[in-house]
Amino acid sequence: QVQLQESGPGLVKPSQTLSLTCTVSGGSSLTSYYVWSWIRQPPGKGLEWMGVIAYDGSTNASPSLKSRSSISRDTSKNLFSLQLNSVTPEDTAVYYCAADEVSSGSPDEYEYDYWGQGTQVTVSS
């Protein structure tokens, strides 16, 4: 069983860095044979896959966000994190962390089995 919980600031000013954390519980470990992703949903739009960190620590990000995003993990605390630099109001969204067992295909195409409840982030001055 995988349980995920996002945490982070609800409000970020433009040009600042957004930092979010996803805590994993339920008996699973970040080193389990899973991929761990960040996905967001802007208001009135669909889900956007942002990036992933795999069980082995390897990472990948959406090409549209790669230049200003990073994903890391702390295996001692069983959490993984997202940093998004130079945010703009267009980064306003509900941010989710999600997980799924490793399978064939690309993590941006997975139908994730496990999701956090989501956290609203608003970028505004």
Image (cartoon, rainbow, N blue to C red):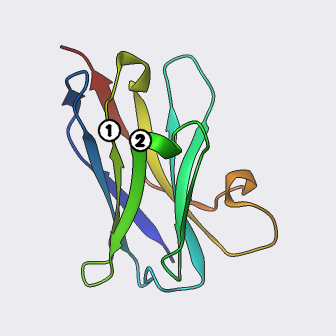
Could you give the CA–CA distance between mark 2 and mark 1, rounded to whole angstroms?
5 Å
Q: Are marks 2 and 1 in contact (CB under 8 Å)?
A: yes
In this rendering, the answer to whether 1 lies above or below 97 is below
Q: Nearer the viewer, residue 39 or 86?
A: 86
In this rendering, the answer to whether 17 lies above or below 15 is below
* Mark with earlier residue (2, 1): 2
In this rendering, the answer to whether 9 lies above or below 23 is above
Q: Is residue 66 left or right of residue 78?
A: right
Quadrant in which residue 26 is drawn: bottom left
Residue at x 52%, y 86% (from the top left corner) = 32
Residue type for callout 1: Asn
Residue at x 44%, y 54% (from the top left corner) = 116
The x, y position of residue 76, in whole percent, is 26, 84
Residue type for callout 2: Arg
Residue at x 45%, y 46% (from the top left corner) = 96
Residue that lies at the very extreme toward the right in this rendered image: 104
Which mark, by number, is residue 68? Answer: 2
Residue at x 18%, y 13% (from the top left corner) = 125
Q: Is residue 48 left or right of residue 87?
A: right
The x, y position of residue 73, in whole percent, is 35, 71
Pointer 1 residue: 85
Which mark, by number, is residue 54? Answer: none
Quadrant in which residue 90 is drawn: top left
The x, y position of residue 107, in whole percent, is 68, 60
Residue 117 appears anywhere in the view: no
Dot 1 lies on which element? loop
Q: Nearer the viewer, residue 48 or 114?
A: 48
| Number of numbered discs visible in the structure rendering | 2
The x, y position of residue 97, in whole percent, is 46, 54
